[in-house]
Image (spheres, coloured by chain):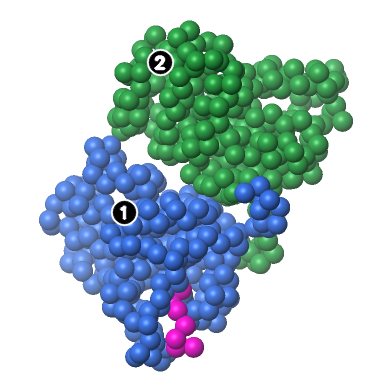
Chain colours: A green, B blue
Amino acid sequence: MNNLAIGMFDSGVGGLTVLNEVRQILPQESIYYLADTARIPYGEKSREAIIRYSIENVRFLIEKGIKLLIVACNTASAHALSVLQAMFDIPIVGVIESGAEKAVRITKNKRIAVLGTRGTISSGIYQKEICERLDGAKVIALACPLLVPLIEEKLFSHAATKMIVQEYLSSLKEQQIDTLLLGCTHYPLLTPLFREELGEGVSIVDSASTCAETVLTTLQKMQLQVSQNAIPKYCYFVSDDPHKFQALGRELLGFPIEDVLSVDYTSDKSEVYEYR
Amino acid sequence: MNNLAIGMFDSGVGGLTVLNEVRQILPQESIYYLADTARIPYGEKSREAIIRYSIENVRFLIEKGIKLLIVACNTASAHALSVLQAMFDIPIVGVIESGAEKAVRITKNKRIAVLGTRGTISSGIYQKEICERLDGAKVIALACPLLVPLIEEKLFSHAATKMIVQEYLSSLKEQQIDTLLLGCTHYPLLTPLFREELGEGVSIVDSASTCAETVLTTLQKMQLQVSQNAIPKYCYFVSDDPHKFQALGRELLGFPIEDVLSVDYTSDKSEVYEYR
């Protein structure tokens, strides 16, 4: 059991920011990363669709053999975490609690802004998680649906991205926030633009590192750490074309992504193969 | 048979531009429109995924009862049309041949640019369809992956959209094209921006009206026209949340969309319903 991998899923490459943090503090653990690129993006889809996709993703990873699961996608954490925790026996960690905890720890004036996809923001989960942890917190939640497409096109510092970021953040400027919580695993890649727009007075928080700490303590508490002499193994599974994932992942995160397997668990594929 | 509906599918609202043309020239025909919003967008996904989704879409519509099918999505037409035509018995019309035909008819200097999603452009189908119809044609094909997200956010004349359109089209300006073919059913909504950028000397062609003409002649040839006294019925099926489709469709196309049904044919749903 202890030598099984940690499983994680996201709709695409965004969750690699979480993987990166996990492998830094748990360098001996093996990781299976599943990117559901056949159904990307999750951010604009309904709660029902996200729950259905998440269940299929977890089933797939459990069949591969994992001891703990990270839902490395904010939208899936927002809609499906509690359903998954009730359905499956392994420990399951999301990214939202971690992010909320960190934001609450950092803020001084209790005014926190959260950016996310439409699905994450409309779920109201960040608002709830923050207010439960911090009396008198004021949370400004903002859906930023264009940021993921712009990031996937690698336009991190393009004038159009800047203009759209400015527009999204303009409403925050009068709110005197001191903390900006990035409620989407893609968004850390735009941190320089957020910084430029909001200035040094605002702390920018992402959930990746806190999530990794939660994974560490969960493994310790449940005595699920890998044995000392284990050799870590990273496998990447994608539900659509692996090449785009591999190229984009490498470019976005600056480390090579090997062992990428294309897997089809998302629908009945029997009639498709003959057309390849 | 003749009183069955015309079926059409797209990944989202884009194909409504085609529906609009069809209902103008065939006002008595009933139409079933399926929007596969659970898996939108198609434009960046692999050929295999698009073929799989398209087969599921057609099966769903055939079960509902249709006499002719329109693949009202360029990416699906590019990857799946021939597969669908080989698999199913009803007449199936795509949007690509229509668009290519129209562009070839209009161009005078044989220099045609095509805009589309990454999937459509990389399939090479427009290049092939145009060159087969016009000796010596020069086709410049350009993938514009950000246009659909911008249109879905209704930023039709936003400065950021303008900037991105300018950047996409900048490479065309030296190519002396006289015809711009819109190879995505969303793109007609940006026609004013394309016009502004390229000037009056370039004809802008979309495939919706030609596709509707093809449907008309196919129905006539096969004697499948609806009986004179039939009352047309429009039904919309969406594989995810119907509200967004309804609101966006109405806003994009300016006509009310009623009778929208949410249907789940995209995966095993048995375990999801209890969480609604």
Say if A202 sits above or below A116 in the image: above
Q: How many marks?
A: 2
Q: Residue at x 51, y 66 (%)?
A: B80
Q: Relative to residue A65, is residue A194 drawn left or right?
A: left
Q: Is residue B6 magenta?
A: yes
Q: Give the CA separation, mark 2 to mark 1.
A: 34 Å
**The quarter of the displayed image where residue B245 is located:** bottom left
Q: Is residue A125 above or below residue A39?
A: above
Task: Give residue A76's position: percent from left, percent from top.
Answer: 60, 38
Q: Which mark is residue B251?
A: 1
Task: State the residue at coordinates (53%, 72%).
Answer: B61
- A218 and B89: which is toward the camera: A218
Numbered range of the magenta stretch: B1-8
Q: Quadrant of residue B136?
A: bottom left
**Residue drawn at (34%, 91%), measured in percent from left and top?**
B228
- Name the chain under label 2: A
Dot 2 and dot 1 within a common chain: no
Quadrant in which the C terminus of chain A is drawn: bottom right
Q: Position of residue B95 (x, y in %)?
A: 38, 68
Instruction: Give the side of residue B241 with respect to residue A1, left or right.
Output: left
Q: Mark 1 belongs to which subunit?
A: B
